[in-house]
Image (tube, rainbow, N blue to C red):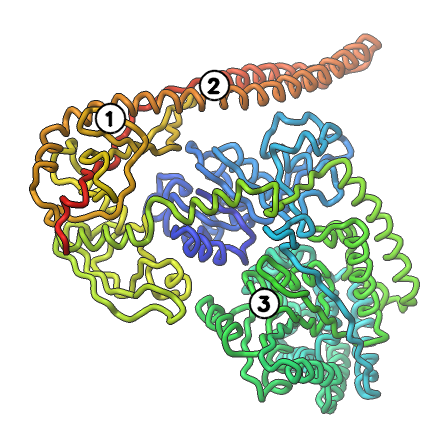
Amino acid sequence: MLIVAPAPLTVQWQEEMREKFDRNFVIYDRETVRTHRKSHPNQNVWKQEDLIITSVDFAKQTTDDPESDRVSVLDALQNLDEEWDVAVFDEAHHLTARRSSDDSIERTQRYQVGAAVADNSDALLLLTGTPHKGKSDQFYFLVSLLDPYRFSHESQISPEALEDLMIRRLKDDMYETDGTRMFPEKNIEALPVEMTREERKLYDDVTEYIREYYNLAQEEENQAAGFTMVIYQKRLVSSIYAIRKSLENRMRAIQNDAVAEDLSDEVQDLIPRYSTEPETLTDAERARVEEALETVTITLNQSQVQQELDRVKQLWQQAKNIETDSKARLLRQFVDRILSEDPDEKILIFTEYTDTLEYLRDEVFADHDVAQVYGDLEQSRRREEMSKFEEEANLMLATDAAQEGLNLQFAHIMVNYDLPWNPIRIDQRMGRLHRYGQEHTVEIRNLFFADTRESEILNLLIEKTNQIESDLGMRSDVLGRVLEDVDLDETIMAAIAEGEPTERVVADIEATIEEKREAIQTVENEFLIRDRFDLSGEDDEILDVIERSQHGEVSEDDIETLVRVFFDEFGGSIKGVRPGPARMEGDVFQLDVPEVLSGNQVARQYPRATFTKDIAMEADDVEFISLDHPLVESLIEFCLDSDRIQGEIATKVAATASRTPGILFNYRLGYVSGAGDVVTEKFVRLYAGPDGSVTTDVPQLSKTVAPSDVSLSHEVDRLSSMAEDLYEAAEMEAWTHVESFAEEARTEREREIEIKREHAERYFEEQIEEWEERLEQYQQRAEQGADMSAPIGNAKQKLESLRREREEELSRLEEEKHVTPQEPELVTAAYVVSPTEAKDE
């Protein structure tokens, strides 16, 4: 299985897969791949692990220079000769391809990653909150990764044609079993802050400094210096402490002659993503960019450098002299009021910058026990801080760099201490609380300095997008689609640099938003599907599946019994270490593994282990012993290492004496597809009675007992003597089931293949017709004297390629129709005896 995600989310994916599915994924990054290639230089690196997580920006690398730190991984991915069983792309809207004006296709390297994985995947899942951002060609190419022959052009896309390719559920369309919304309302209010006279002067003076040097950077086309000024403007409205630190760093860099006119190649490569897609950068990459930008200067003229130093010193002194931060004072008042009404309330406070977080922690809330998460906090510390916020602390301070992976639906009040210039990040902040499991209206408060261009622009955007959400009845992807073509950094800085009246800037943005509103409505009506998820009525089947899964045939008690019986039989030990949390049942044990199992993936000892999932989820240091844990898998494999069932097998006790004795057989059924894939999808339980009859109606069982707990009575003797005959009878019945199963699969496959064949036929027919028309036009122009040899040759080559591809695709689809039953695989067998056959303990 392969999971491709933005770099900041790879660790979160790894932890979630371990916690939710007990699967240990390997994160592929530069160091991991380099190590793998050293140990297996002649093997495709993507074949060396079965469970892989990587970032799309790592996978897209094509550099093959042995002197480079980068490794060429995209070519290896494109030349992989094996299929992924399942491939998942998180934030799949980053896989972008578009049509150029000459109708050629521009495929980004990220899209090439998607295409390479799509070509080598049995199942492909694309996850995104913004599937369609208003560009129909980009949406078409994204959908084509799932089915390249579904549409020959974006004009053919319709909601009806997407029904079996796409599931799209907005928060407003999801309901609980009682008919209430799964996601409650959110209430957003502004908390404007009036500056003091000193704060206004500092704001005006720093803004004037920024305006002057930003304009100079634009004149000299020094992009890096321009970015530096953008950061200063953002930090200015974040907190006085943050801008003071920036001015201090700038002053120190100039004094130490550490300024530079440009950035390193590595930082230059990160700048485009830092500007337009900051969420794709790791914390370390983001810090590298901002640290480098603070040392960039526009010119190295000594006189000008001295002038800047004098000016920065003066601004720094101004900031240092301001004792009271009005925004911090208002925040403290807001928090005090909330906690006076409810001392147990939880409040999440977001800021863009770690400097501002430290100021709030050390100065504003020094008398509070505050939880905190920021970019370079280790994962173990993050978990500790999140637990602290849930159980003890009233306040959590968080930066945007750390927000991914924060699931804090137990709180419902959030304060934006500063407003990111990318409002999508505001939406992402709200998503930390406004998520499944939230039981209250989410209260959002936006703190900002009144009468500043940036604040007025950002507030307008937030108000307008919320209005669009309300008008169109949507929540989820509105903000991303509204701002697709709006460069807020450029808009705000242009307004500041040119002194343009705020009213005019606001009017221009408002007009753009209104245009986007119409485009969004068109996309909703003509391109996207919208599913309703309603557990109160139409989705009862989902609840049935959940209910059955929670009461499966293999319970946690079954696993514990299996391990205990095996350990007793083969010399292992299980010692209680400590009880689980008081609110849960179950204990934590030390497992000393029998020698017959230890080795490979099985440890000799598990110091802290539990058979209870809830305990494992509560404590990171406790190993969860589940059905697919290596210990249990190894144990089962050991027990099944026999070609006969007459040996020492498990014994189960029936709840009543009716229909006993007998033998219970568990079979795995599967089939081989026309493509040669072995598909295993079904288990069947067969019960063979002493009269030789075989049925799927298995007696109710009360418990499993060790062989030593069953007396050697006539029932066990009788079953042992009949085992071979009953096995043959069960085998014949299993064949009947697998043939029926394969026939069902064959019918379903034929239906699916027929749909795919129709799509492929239509696709190739339209493409061939289009190129035949082009060829005819080229030939007509050639007859008129034009030199059309190259276009004619290209058109003929394209037609030949299309016809060949059509035959290959139709042949492949025909092959996929074939289904061949596999020989039933006996997984386990057990004697079933009456209650009187088991010794009383």
User: Label 3 sits on what residue type?
Assistant: Ala
In this picture, is 702 found above or below 15? Answer: above
**Quadrant in the picture for residue 667:** top left
Q: Earlier in the sequence, mark 1 or mark 3?
A: 3
User: Label 1 sits on what residue type?
Assistant: Ala
In what element is the residue under mark 3?
A: helix
Q: Which residue is mark 3?
A: 287
Q: Residues within 10 Å of mark 1 (few under 14, many from 20)?
A: many
**Residue 730 tag number:** 1
The N terminus, quarter of image = top left
* 816 or 63, nearer to the observer: 816
Q: Are marks 1 and 3 in contact (CB under 8 Å)?
A: no
Q: Position of residue 569 (x, y in %)?
A: 13, 52
**Which residue sits at x=36%, y=28%?**
670
Q: CA distance from mark 1 to mark 2?
A: 29 Å
The C terminus, quarter of image = bottom left
User: Relative to residue 589, is residue 361 drawn left or right?
Assistant: right
Q: CA distance from mark 1 to mark 3?
A: 65 Å
Q: Position of residue 595 (x, y in %)?
A: 14, 53
Q: Are marks 2 and 3 in contact (CB under 8 Å)?
A: no
Q: Residues within 10 Å of mark 2 (few under 14, many from 20)?
A: many
User: Label 2 sits on what residue type?
Assistant: Lys
In this picture, is 796 found above or below 459? Answer: above
**Which residue sits at x=33%, y=60%?**
623
Q: Position of residue 100 (x, y in %)?
A: 74, 35
In what element is the residue under mark 2?
A: loop
Q: Which residue is mark 2?
A: 817
